[in-house]
Amino acid sequence: MKNLVRQLDLESNVIFTGWLEGEDLIVAYNGIDVCVSPSICFEAFGMTNLEAMASKKPVVSTYFGGPKEVVVDGKTGYLVNPYKITLMAKKILDLLENPEKAKKFGEAGHQRAEKFFSLKKQSEKILDYYYEK
């Protein structure tokens, strides 16, 4: 990736951070405009999307696998076939060129993350399941 960025003369636009966690991860999410996850693999869940939504950031993600359970297409972000590169680029540009829409998607994503995926909600689900048995 570093070679490709250098070949395309994008060094001033791309930051390779390496592994991030804790406060560094929070700072990184706060510093982005849009979270893009164009994975061509069948994602099991897509924690990156959920972390971005919790940080009030809109998401453009693959529609393969788990992201469909997290991202609501056209409300918290966009779900796109990652092989449709032009469409993926259009969705990213739509959010970058329409900051009010991006903010609206980010807020909706944050609400969805809190409502369905918070630690409290997940704990309640586990306890409900446990007591059903």
Image (spheres, rainbow, N blue to C red):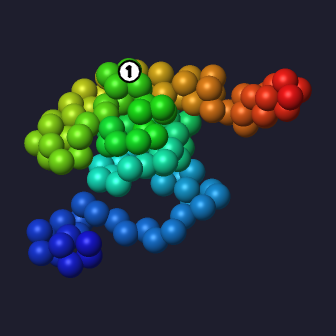
Mark 1 highlights which residue? 75
Tell me where residue 12 appears, x and y as whole percent. 24, 65
- Quick check: 6 left or right of 75? left
Identify the image quadrant of the N terminus. Answer: bottom left
Which residue is at a point 54% across and 28% down the rendered structure image? 110
Which residue is at a point 51% across and 68% down the rendered structure image? 19
Tell me where residue 88 appears, x and y as whole percent. 20, 41
- Quick check: 95 left or right of 75? left
Which residue is at a point 32% across and 22% down the rendered structure image? 74
Tag 1's secondary structure? loop
Q: Is 75 situated above or below 37?
A: above
Which of the 4 image quarters holds residue 118? top right
Q: Quick one: 2 or 103, which is closer to the camera?
A: 2
Tell me where residue 62 appears, x and y as whole percent. 32, 42
Q: Disc 1 residue type? A: Lys
Which of the 4 image quarters holds residue 86? top left
Tell me where residue 122 appears, x and y as whole percent. 72, 33
- Quick check: 7 left or right of 36? left
